[in-house]
Image: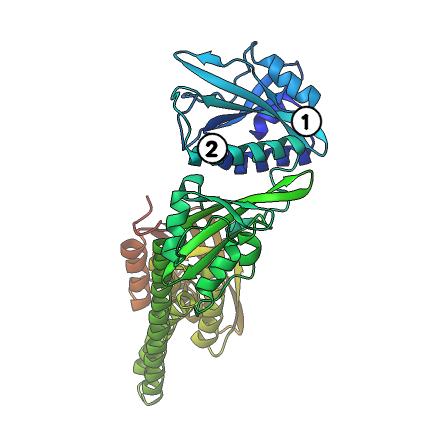
Amino acid sequence: MSDLILEHAELEPADVEWLHLLVGDWQVISDLAFADLVLWLPTTDGGFVALAQCRPSTGSTVHYDDIVGSFAPEGQRPQLLRAIEETRAQRAREPRWFGAYAVREEAVPVVHKGRAIAVVSRQTNLGSGRTPSRLELNYVEAADDLVAMVARGEFPLPNAATGPRRGAPRVGDGLIRLNSEGEVLYASPNALSCFHRLGVIGPLGGQSLVEVVARVIEKQANPVDESLPLVMMGRAPWRTDVEARGVALSLRAMPLTDHGHRIGAVLLCRDVSELRRRERELITKDATIREIHHRVKNNLQTVAALLRLQARRMDVPEARAALEEAMRRVATIALVHESLSQTLDEQVELDDMVGRALRLTADVASAQTTVRTVRNGSFGLVPAQDATPLALILTELVTNAVEHGFPGRTSGTVEVNVERNGSDMRVIVSDDGVGLPSGDDGAAGGAGPGSGLGTQIVRTLVMNELGGTIEWSAREGGGTEVELRLALRDGGGRAS
């Protein structure tokens, strides 16, 4: 739509935004009018191009093929032009035939800030030829009010709320027409069914809707949205929910105005009880999963503390070192579960967690050497099933770099460089230590041959858990460089 506007006309940004707002809300008009809507934009060469179209879900369509981007036929242009020039709706005297069926056409100017910037063509298929019902008459009357607001520059509603207060109910879900005092002029059968399920007994016609609903919910313990009275009286163009007796209704009000004065409203309603029940189930499930991650984290921290206590009692240096390494690995896994317990998604924001883990690893790995850890780039959100092995790999690589890369030195630097493109990730862990021993390749960090437990853990996790590759090489300028390439999982499966 924006591309067509740029190609065929020169409109101010505010005018373009107005057209986008209209198209975002005009499905209601199409359903109420039982008519196709086509948005025509006057072009610089005197013609009209179709910017958007809308088909009714309540009746037969006129345009079975998409006409967006096409130009108005010669016979329709005079009507569209008069709507622009006179800034008022133009209804054709005679139906126009589309093949085997007749179509009644009306051209409605789209007015913004007193200027007609486009035209909406309202095209009704007259193929049924039957007498309209009371419901259809009320639908069409409501559509006429909204169309008149479009021609006066009062629709789309400029102060309509965005986000969760828009959308939801459709015309077929249930419709109520209100007067300026919030009293019910007409309620469709579906709307009556919705309010009967809520606990409203008897007809709604002639009653104040907000008072009727207030009597139903006054004894309920459920919290009530502060905007509910404004919506139910048709004063605010918002959406809200009302709950009572296990039933939830979604309500959306569309105030009707005439030159700025409110003359009534259209209220759309929909029974969303099942939807709200499923939402509560999902919230409960999410809370349970977070609690599980929290408890797993606590248990792992307990295991790490027990390993630490056991290491302190060891007199054999090798045994103490092995227990301390096991404690560090368990603590790294606990960090992942701690992150998962603080989010609703099964994804981990790895940057902060890796930063904490690497600083702790560098401090613990060597008491004699001061090691600075630097991270460049961002890991971003990583699926939970990949976060644990990736965190363990990085911890092992930094540990090996610190333990074997800086013998006899008082300081050193370990860098972690991350490059990510979607699910593809490239990580380089480098140090400025002594580098790989002569003739060795495939060692972890700055150490010798990859025969140690840490190296075996790294290789197993990279190849089996992450399906990636890892390569050790000498770093330019001295030291060791480890390159890790992998494809993160997308959802529940392995990324290709």
Identified at 64% across, 44% down, the residue is 262
Q: Which residue in the structure is indicated by mark 2?
A: 137
Q: Closer to the N terminus: mark 1 or mark 2?
A: 1
In three-dimensional space, the C-alpha distance between marks 1 and 2, rounded to whole angstroms, equals 29 Å
Q: How many marks?
A: 2
Q: Which mark is residue 92?
A: none
Q: Nearer the viewer, mark 1 or mark 2?
A: 2
Q: Position of residue 398 (x, y in %)?
A: 43, 65
x, y percentage for residue 471? 37, 52
Outermost top residue: 74
The residue wearing badge 1 is 116
Q: Splitting the image into 4 quarters, where does residue 453 fall?
A: bottom left
Foreground residue among 183 and 3 = 183
- Residue sitting nearer the eye, 362 or 7: 7
Label 2: element kind: helix
Location of residue 152 in the rendering, given as x and y in whole percent from the top left corner:
66, 33
Q: Give 431 or 111, whichever is nearer the viewer.
A: 111
